[in-house]
Image (cartoon, rainbow, N blue to C red):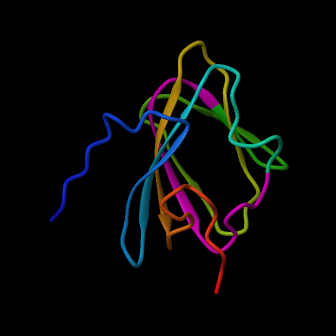
């Protein structure tokens, strides 16, 4: 069992920890901020589970948009282009789980082997 602090991880995107099979990260988007310019498929080999800790926003795909609020849990399937947007007045803070890991320790997309 391991415990990880999230207190100092409130920058835009921070990897918390990764194992061989999964990875945890925090994302903080400021009001009006977005995870990308448009829905994209940044990590096609990994599914993403996104849990909203605080703030409000929208999760967009090419075809639909879903409202996000504290307590929302979202599954983004493998190969699903997506974009997360902060539509509120406070930071949108999310905990993200990637299965398998999608990013290196600096937050850059892992290259698929």
Q: Furthest-front residue in view?
A: 106
Residue lying at 41% horizontally and 77% vertically, measured from the top left: 21
Point 49% across, 70% down: residue: 99
Q: Quadrant of the N terminus?
A: bottom left
Residue 67: percent from the left, percent from the top?
A: 63, 32
- On screen, residue 13 versus residue 9, left or right, reads right
Residue situated furthest left in the rendering: 1
User: Which residue lies at the image location 66% right of the left edge and 75% below the top edge?
Assistant: 111
Q: Is residue 25 above or below residue 42?
A: above
Residue 60 lies, in percent from the top left, at 74, 42
Query: Was residue 75 drawn as part of the magenta stretch in this picture?
Result: no
Q: Nearer the viewer, residue 61 or 109?
A: 109
**Stretch in magenta:** 40-57
Indicate whether 85 appears above or below 113: above
Picture layout, residue 63 above or below residue 97: above
Residue closest to the far top: 89
Q: How many marks?
A: 0
Residue occupying image coordinates x 53% and y 65%: 104
**What percent of the width, then of the height, locates residue 19?**
36, 72
Q: Magenta stretch containing residue 41, yes or no?
A: yes
Residue 24 image offset from top left, x and y in percent: 41, 57
* In the rendered image, the vertical position of residue 43 relative to residue 67, given as above or below: below
32 sits left or right of 28 in the view: right
Q: What quarter of the picture does the C terminus occupy?
A: bottom right
Res 31 → quadrant: top right
Q: Is residue 43 left or right of residue 24?
A: right
Outermost residue, bottom side: 113
């Amino acid at each position: 069992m391991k415990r990880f602090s999230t207190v100092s991880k409130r920058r835009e995107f921070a990897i918390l920890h990764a194992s061989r099979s999964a990875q945890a990260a925090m994302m903080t988007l400021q009001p009006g901020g977005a995870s990308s310019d448009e829905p994209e498929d940044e990590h096609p080999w990994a599914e993403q589970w996104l849990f909203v800790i605080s703030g409000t926003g929208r999760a967009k795909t090419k075809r639909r948009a879903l409202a996000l609020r504290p307590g929302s849990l979202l599954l983004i399937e493998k190969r699903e282009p997506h974009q997360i947007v902060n539509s509120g007045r406070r930071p949108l803070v999310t905990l993200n789980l990637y299965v398998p890991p999608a990013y290196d320790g600096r937050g850059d997309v892992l290259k698929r082997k």
